[in-house]
Image (cartoon, rainbow, N blue to C red):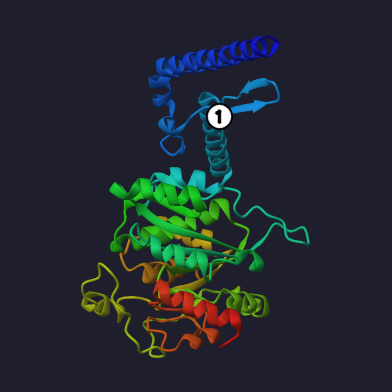
Amino acid sequence: MMKRRNKSCLGVFVIGLFTVYIFIVYRWFFRESAGSKIQQDNLPTDSGLKQQDWSPPLVVSGLGLDVSFVILDEQIKSKKQEENNREGEEEELWKLSPFWVEDQRPHINPHRYGILMSPNPNLCHQKKDDGKNLIDLLIIVASAVDHGTRRDAIRETWGSNLKLHNTKLIFLLGQGRDKQSKIQNEHNLYNDILQEDFEDTYHNLTLKTIMGLKWMSIFCPQAQYVLKTDDDIYVNVDLLHKSLLKESKTLSQNIHGCIKNSPLNSPMPIPKEGQASLAHHATLMRPALPQFTAGAGYLIPGKLAPELYVASLSTKLLPVEDAYTTGFCAKKIGSHPPVNDPRFSCGQLVEKDCDMAKLFTGHKVTPERMWTIYQKLQKGIC
């Protein structure tokens, strides 16, 4: 009789607990349903939270029932507050920069495009062992919306151990249009994309470089050097970084790269996507263009990068990115001609993987080959 009574009481107790749980879920469901429209209106597009995928976790401990709900409202508020703080920090750094005043003035070539996404404004704010807040090298990579595979290859190969070389890396993109959500997800994962709302086309490569120089001038002015390159280029960061330290007296004085329109360098550049013919480019090269370095990879001393950006504001835009930046703009700031360095690619293909052991940059390297070269260099095969 006693056992039967205990079982009966236990059954009532369990039913009671289950009823309490159902009641709580019932109240939560209708509260959320009533406020769903408000929440959806306030939900950031890149918050990564999906109401339909969320369910309240149930935690049972001991004889008691602890129903723990993660309140969606709080998650949204926290995410939104974090974004607001970051945007506020970016705006504060921007307004404190002397380029804020410069941007308000009338210019021949103003760069006032809207920023769609950008790396953390504190990306370059780290102290070295000696207490100095300096970055040895900032690498800005001109990429394209559809080149996600190339960006991933870079992140996993030559761009994977940059902390060892006190180096930072960002990718430069134009607007993504129908692929914008995919780019946003990629940026949420890696936080290394700088994107403005101009068209992502070959003829806007110049705008990408100007965008990168502007961002560096505001958010990473402590970078000692800036390397501008493309997403089909293999960069031997280890060799480049060692050279920056050993050859600082010469490398820090001027722009270095492979001078494309020089008798020293005969190979013609290889056409890229969107560049149907090199005929127009070739006719411009002599004698209309000043000497300039190939856009596949050139090194700018950090102190010159802000000057180049300011010079671009008063220089008529030219769709030949490398000639515009290292030719016309460099001339305007008195940093011309650039210095020819055979360790930078001038457009020729890398014939053998191990050639990269003695080069700073290698041109037209596929994602698959990046892995091959990276592994050979890492293992000391070359």
Question: In which quarter of the view is residue 264 placed?
Answer: bottom left
Q: Amino acid at mark 1?
A: Pro
The image shows residue 245 at horizontal and vertical percentages of: 67, 75
Q: Which residue is mark 1?
A: 57
Q: Is 349 left or right of 131, judged from the image as shown?
A: left
**Image check: 246 left or right of 138?**
right
The answer to whether 152 is drawn above or below residue 373 in the figure is above
**Outermost residue toward the right?**
130
Q: Identify the image quadrant of residue 377.
A: bottom right
Q: Position of residue 106 (x, y in %)?
A: 39, 46
Whether residue 338 appears in this view of the structure is: no
Q: Is residue 45 left or right of residue 56?
A: left
The image quadrant of residue 292 is bottom left
**Image point 49% across, 29% down: which residue?**
55
Q: Residue at x 62, y 74 (%)?
A: 241
The image position of residue 148, as x and y in percent, is: 39, 60
The residue shown at (66%, 9%) is 5
Q: Nearer the viewer, residue 51 or 24?
A: 24
Q: State whether residue 217 is above or below residue 19.
A: below
Q: Position of residue 265 (x, y in %)?
A: 39, 88
